[in-house]
Amino acid sequence: MDSSSSQTEFDYLFKLLLIGDSGVGKSSLLLSFTSDTFEDLSPTIGVDFKVKYVTVSGKRLKLAIWDTAGQERFRTLTSSYYRGAQGIIMVYDVTRRETFTNLSDIWAKEIDLYSTNQDCIKMLVGNKVDKESERVVSKKEGINFAREYGCLFIECSAKTRVNVQQSFEELVLKILDTPSLLAEGSKGVKKNIFKQKPPQSDASTSSCC
Amino acid sequence: MSSLLTPTQRYAAGALFALALHQAQIHQTRPLGGSLPTDEEDSTGERISSGSSSDSVSEDPGLWVHESSGLLRPVFRFLEIDSTAWLGLEETAGSSPAKSHIGAFLRLLSEESGASSEMTDKEHALSKAIDVMAQSMETTTVISNSKKEKHREYEHECREKYSVADMQSKSEQVNVHFETQPATNFNVRSEEGPSGSDNKSDERPVEEVMMLNYQKKVTVLYELLSACLADLPEDNKKRMRQRKGYDARHRVALRLLATWFDLNWIQVEAIETIVASSAMALAKEQESKQEETQSPKSSWAKWRRGGIIGAAALTGGTLMAITGGLAAPAIAAGFGALAPTLGTLIPVIGASGFAAAASAAGTVAGSIAVAASFGAAGAGLTGSKMARRIGSVDEFEFKPIGENHNQGCLAVGIFISGLVFEEEDFLRPWEGLSENLERYALQWESKNLIAVSTAIQDWLTSRFALELMKQGAMMTVLSTLLVALAWPATLLAAADFIDSKWTIAVDRSDKAGKLLAEVLLKGLQGNRPVTLVGYSLGARVIFKCLQCLAETEQNAELVERVVLLGAPISIKDENWEAARKMVAGRFMNAYSTDDWTLGVAFRASLLTKGLAGIQPVDVHGIENVDVTELIEGHSSYLWATQQILEQLELDTYYPVFRSTPAEP
C-alpha cells in the first residue's frame, strides 16, 4: 500500500473510527499509521482527527480517521461519531484483560446502538504485542471473539509498527469489496455545501484565497 | 480559579461554539426554515453517511471554523483547551449533521460534575447578576412605550403630510392588486410566530438541553463571550483576522448557541453588558493605579493584568477597541458612568454576590481586546474629514439615538433613512425602536434627499398623478413597468420630472455607501458588530457599503445583520451573493409589490432587471419579506419601518416575520 501525503486527488473517501478503552493505544496506533512514529501520548481529549491518503489496489483513497477518547467521561461524546463510519476499529490491549472484555460488554453494544451503517466493516485489533511477556489475552481468544462478532482480526504493535499498516489495509480492502460502502465513499456523493453555491458567487468573491 | 467551568466543560463549550459557528456559516446561504431546508442536508446526510461525504475542514480555508479564519483557535486558547484537541474540534464542527454532535456535547457539558462548591457559588452569583442586568434592560424597554406614543404621533404627522396621494391610489387599487401580484412570501413563513412548531424542531434539535441547568448555560455563554473578546497577548502566530474586538461572526454563533440553549437573547445582551462594563471599570481602575485586582494569582490572571497595564501604558484612551470610535468622546468623558451600570447590581444581589460576580467577571475583563485607539475623534469629525476627501458627498454624519450610549453595549446599529422631507426624518423613523443596540442614525446628503423626496411628493400630488389615480390606473402601472414594454406617456413626463434629482441622489447614495464602508473598515464603530437598517436610498447606501466591503474584506466580520426596506437596487445587475457574504447573520429584504413610486423613480429600463424594493431577491440566504400590507406608498417607510422591524424580530436567530404586530 503506497502512501503519500501530498496527494489530494482521490477516488474514494472513507470514514474510519477508532474505539476502545482508555490507554489501549488508539492514538498511538493512528500516529504510527499516519506518520510512522511512536511516542508517549497523553490521553486523548474528546476526539482527534487525522487524514491519510493511501493507494490500495489501484484506488486512491482518502481516509478520514476519527480517534476517540477512551476515557469514561467522554463516552457520551463518541456516540455521535459512529454515524456514517464505513469502518470501525475496536482496539484492546493484549496485556490488560479488562480492555478485551469491555469490548463485548461496552464497545460492541455501542456500535450496535449508534452505528448507522448496516454494512459497516468492523475490525478487532489487539495492540501492544511487543510486550509478549506481559500478554494476558491470547491470540486464540481474539480470533474467537472476532468470529463470534463477525469482524476482522489482527494483532499489532503501534510501538514496533508490526502489522499497523496491514490492519488498516485489510480494513480498507474489505470496505472496497462492499458495494454499498463503496457507493457512499465515492466522490459522486461527496458534497461540500459551500461549493454548491451558485457559480457566479464563487467567481466574483472567492478569488482571494 | 480562572474559569468557572471544569476543563471538560470548557472543552464541550468550545465544541458547541465551533458547531454554532459552522452552522451559522451554513445558514448564511441556507437560513433555517428557508426554502432550501437544512433538513435536506440532515436527511441526506443520514442516508449517505455524513462524515465521509464532506471534505475535512482543514482543506477549506473559506470556512469560519478553519484555522486561518482566526475565529476559533483564540477562543480555544482562552478556554485553555488542550491544543491537541483543537483539530478534532474543528473537524467535528465541520462534519455533518451537526445535530447529533450538539446533543452529545450538551450531554458532556451537563454530565461532567466535580465542580468545586466555590465554582458553583460563583456560577450562581454570576447568573444572578446577569438576571438582574437583563431585568433592568427589559425595564428600559418597557419605558420605551412612551417613545412608541411619540412614534405614533410622528406617523400621524407623516400621514397627513405625505401620504394623501399614495393612500388614494392604494384604496382604489386594493381589489386589483391581489390578482396581479399575488403576495408571495419567499423563504419566510409569515404565519408563524417564533414558536411555530416545525420551526422549533429545526433549531432546537436536542432534548439534551433540558439536562443543562440555567446557571450552567449562562456561565458557558459568559465564558465564550469573554473568549471572543479576549485578546491573548501570547498569540504571536500570524494573525489572520485583521482586527480585534468583537467579530460579527462570533456574535452570530453566540446567538445560535443561545437559541440551542433555549435562552432569551436579552440574557446574552446582559452578559455582553456585564463583560464590557466590567472590562472598562477594570481598565479605569488600572489606569488610576488605585489597587490590585482581586483576581487570584493564577498564570492567567497575571498576564491578563499584564495585558491591561501594557495597554494602559500605550495610550491614555484605552479600551477604545470595544467602545471607541463612534462613542469615543463620550466614553472618555464618562468612564464613571459605567461603574454605576454594574453598581446597580449590588443592592439586588448583595455585596458578596457582587464580589463573586465581579471576580467572575474580572477573570475575563483584563484580557479584552485593546486593539487600537481612535483618540477623541468622533464619527462626526472623522466623517466630515472623509467627506472632504471623497469630494462629492457634502454631508455624512452619525447622530446618536436612544439611550443605550455609554452603557457598555457591545453591538451597534446604524439606521439610514432614504426618503426625507425634513432633517428630522433622518432620526424620527428610528426613535421608537427598542433594540438593545447602541444606535446611530446616519444623516447624509440631506439637501439632495429632501430635493428628490419633495420632487416625488410634488409629482404625486400633481394633476397628472391625481388624474391617473382617479382612473385607477396606478394599480396596473407597476405590472406594466415590470414588463417594461410600454410606458404610459404621463409617466414618462413624471420620470423626467424626477429624473435628474433622482440620478444625483442615487449617485450620492453610492458614494455614501463607500464612505460607510470606510467608516466600518476603520473600526470607528469600535470594532463591534454592526446592524445596518435602511429604507429607500438608505437601503442603497447599505448595499453599496456591503459591496465595497466585499472588495476589500474576505469575510463577514463587521456586519452582523442587514435590513433593506424598499431598496432601489437592481436585482440582476448587482452581485447580491458578494454582499450577502459580508453579513454574518440575517440579511432581510423587505419589499412592497405596490410601491410604484419606487418603480417610477427607478426607471423602466432598470426594472426589467428586477428591483429589490418591489420584488423578492432570489438569492440564497436572503430573507424576502413581503410588506405590501404595511406599506401604502413609498413614503410609508418613514413610519412603517418601525413596525416592520418589530415584526422581523431582529434578535431572533432564524428568519421570522410575525404576521401580527405585538400590540394592536
Image (cartoon, rainbow, N blue to C red):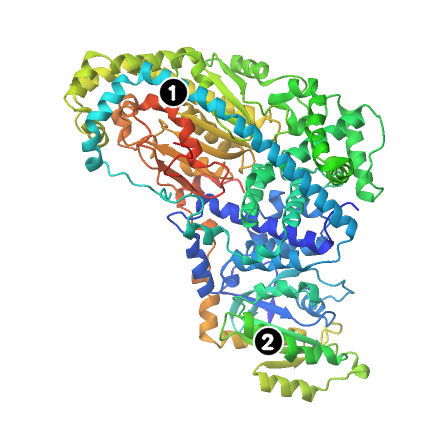
The tally of labels here is 2
Check disc 1: other Cα within 10 Å, few if <14, some if 14-19, many if 20+.
Answer: some
Q: Amino acid at mark 1?
A: Glu
Say which of B239 and B450 sits in front: B450
In this picture, residue B378 sits left or right of residue B478: right
Q: Do marks 2 and 1 both belong to one polypeptide chain?
A: no
Asked whether residue A134 appears in the rendered view, the answer is yes
Say which of B216 and B546 sits in front: B216
Disc number for residue A109:
2
Asked if A160 appears above or below B506 in the picture, the reply is below
Q: Chain of mark 2?
A: A
Disc number for residue B155:
1
Q: Which residue occupies 20% across, 35% down?
A: B180
In this picture, residue B22 sits left or right of residue B329: left
Q: Which residue occupies 43% across, 62% down?
A: A188
Asked if B290 appears above or below B228 in the picture, the reply is above
The secondary element bearing badge 1 is classed as: helix
Q: Which residue occupies 57% across, 49% down?
A: B261
Query: Which of the image's four quarters has the N terminus of chain A?
Result: bottom right
Q: Position of residue B267 (x, y in %)?
A: 60, 40
- Of tags 2 and 1, the one toward the viewer is 1
Asked if B620 appears above or below A125 in the picture, the reply is above
Check disc 2: other Cα within 10 Å, few if <14, some if 14-19, many if 20+.
Answer: few
Q: Quadrant of residue B471?
A: top left
